[in-house]
């Protein structure tokens, strides 16, 4: 039984750790989504300003396009990180589900073992009661024979 409690406690602690990791990954994914949205908004603003007013010089245009290119690269990197964070979050969720399933299996096994021990104890007690009853019947039958 003691080993069962240690296993259950270990599974519980692991589930808490996984849940904490999951929370961190979800927060990280949210911040990545915010950064991506902000960068895409900045990219659209830059694209709009390029098409609306047009740069005064070729150097201004080149600077704006390189900035826009940098924003695209950063947005792509953030999208990849976001995908990685989502994948890790899914993996962590799966690990938590597996631990819960494992803990439930151990709980069922523990219940079966407890029931088996209880039935065995009842059988042992019933055997002792039957033996005592048999001794009592023998003593009474010997007492009845001696009186006659």
Image (cartoon, grey):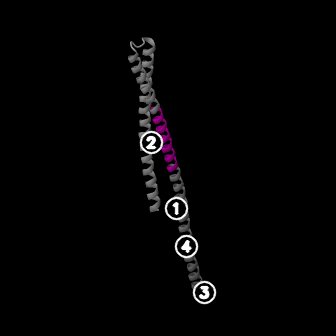
Mark 3 surroundings: few (<14), some (14-19) or many (≥20) residues within 10 A: few
The residue pinned by badge 4 equals 129
Disc number for residue 22: 2
Earlier sequence position, callout 3 versus callout 1: 1
Marks 1/2: CA distance?
35 Å
Toward which corner of the image does residue 67 lie, by quadrant? Answer: top left
**Could you say where residue 96 lies in the image, as x and y percent from the top left?**
49, 46
Marks 4/3: CA distance?
24 Å
Residues at marks 3 and 1 touching, judged by CB atoms closer than 8 Å: no
Marks 1/4: CA distance?
22 Å
Residue shown at the point (42%, 43%) measured from the top left: 21
Earlier sequence position, callout 1 versus callout 2: 2
User: Residue extending furthest front?
Assistant: 58
Viewport quadrant of the C terminus: bottom right
Marks 2/3: CA distance?
81 Å
Marks 4/2: CA distance?
57 Å
| Foreground residue among 97 and 49 | 49
Earlier sequence position, callout 1 versus callout 4: 1
| Foreground residue among 94 and 60 | 60
Mark 2 surroundings: few (<14), some (14-19) or many (≥20) residues within 10 A: many
Residue numbers of the magenta segment = 78-99
Disc number for residue 44: none
The residue pinned by badge 1 equals 114
| Foreground residue among 96 and 89 | 89
Closer to viewer: mark 3 or mark 1: 1
Closer to viewer: mark 4 or mark 2: 2
The residue pinned by badge 3 equals 145
Marks 3/1: CA distance?
46 Å
Earlier sequence position, callout 4 versus callout 2: 2
């Amino acid at each position: 039984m003691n080993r069962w409690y240690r296993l259950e406690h270990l599974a519980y602690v692991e589930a808490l750790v996984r849940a904490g990791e999951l929370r961190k990954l979800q927060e990280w994914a949210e911040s990545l989504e915010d950064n991506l949205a902000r960068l895409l908004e900045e990219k659209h603003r830059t694209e709009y300003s390029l098409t609306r007013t047009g740069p005064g010089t070729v150097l201004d245009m080149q600077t704006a396009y390189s900035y826009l290119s940098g924003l695209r690269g950063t947005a792509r990197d953030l999208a990849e990180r976001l995908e990685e964070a989502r994948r890790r979050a899914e993996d962590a969720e799966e690990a938590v589900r597996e631990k819960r399933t494992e803990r439930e299996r151990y709980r069922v096994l523990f219940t079966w073992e407890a029931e088996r021990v209880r039935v065995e104890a009842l059988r042992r007690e019933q055997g002792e009661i039957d033996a005592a009853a048999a001794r009592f019947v023998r003593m009474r039958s010997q007492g009845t024979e001696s009186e006659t």
